[in-house]
Image: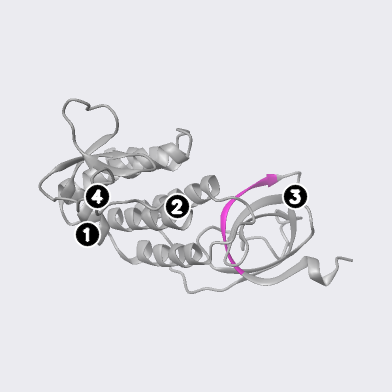
Amino acid sequence: MIADKQVQEAQPAFVLHAYPYRETSLIVETFTRSFGRVPLVAKGAKRPRSALRGLLRAFQPLLLTWGGKSELRTLHKAEWQGGQMPLQGTALICGFYLNELLVRLLHRHDPHEQLFSYYQETLAALSIEKDYIPILRRFEQRMLRELGYALTLDHDVASGKPTDPNEDYCYEIERGPVAWDESNPNHGLRLSGKTLLDMEKGDYSNAATRQQSKSLMRYILNHYLNDQPLHTRQLLKDLQQL
């Protein structure tokens, strides 16, 4: 019998990823409000009559109860909370992109309650809005800030001067923008001051801002992902080509 102090009851959570474990079970990577990313073994979840069958799906708000002291906890109960519209088409792939980022960048058992709220808001936005680019950029920025990698956008980190929308800048990883120097063009990503200021405001209405912000976020995320490719990024690219 598991002691009460080892059991977490009815914790708000989402499934990020699940894969088979032995013949009838699943390993489920979950994102929980109070405990961060928690891996759980769902014993017997693949059996036809399992109470867990059909519940452990991505993008659906759940209340999960689990126990155990090892790295891999045991899932005892899952309850569907409802209220989240299903994601379809491109929005569905965007959702999987968010999940892949969280699986790759979140440390296990490291709580991020504000990021959990951002994730919920982003799923809701993806389910009703057709322009997903601003939604993804805002989530990426919020996620990096919550993980301690906040972007500097509003000033030149070398001179301290405010970002000038009419000037070009080089964005240096883990520092920020510095004035573009034609004599040293290979030390970072080049982009306009307007793009930086638009990103600071969350304004993605400008075509150049949309393109440059995508390049910047890919540049930065690749650094923190150790240049390991994201599978969903390729799916989005293929879908756009179709």
Within-10-Å neighbours for mark 4: few <14, some 14–19, many 20+ = few
Of the numbered discs 4 and 3, the one sitting upstream in the chain is 3
Tell which tag, 1 or 2, sits nearer the viewer. Answer: 1
Regarding mark 4 in the picture, which secondary structure is present there?
Answer: loop
Q: Are marks 2 and 4 in contact (CB under 8 Å)?
A: no
Which residue occupies the extreme right position in the image? 1
> The N terminus appears in which quarter of the rendering?
bottom right
Of the numbered discs 2 and 4, the one sitting upstream in the chain is 2
Residue depicted at 31% across the width and 45% down the height: 176
Residue matched to label 1: 203
Q: Amino acid at mark 1?
A: Asp
Residue matched to label 4: 160
Marks 3 and 1, Cα distance to the nearest angstrom? 47 Å
Residue depicted at 60% across the width and 67% down the height: 34
Residue depicted at 58% across the width and 65% down the height: 13
Residue matched to label 2: 98
Q: Which residues are magenta?
A: 12-20
Give whichever of 105, 85 is nearer the camera.
105
List x then y, in percent, for residue 124.
Answer: 40, 67
Image-quadrant location for residue 235: top left
List x then y, in percent, for residue 144.
Answer: 42, 52
43 vs 33, left or right, is: right
212 vs 16, left or right, is: left
Q: Are marks 1 and 2 in contact (CB under 8 Å)?
A: no
List x then y, in percent, for residue 52.
Answer: 68, 63
Residue 242 seen anywhere in this rendered image of the structure: no
Of the numbered discs 3 and 1, the one sitting upstream in the chain is 3
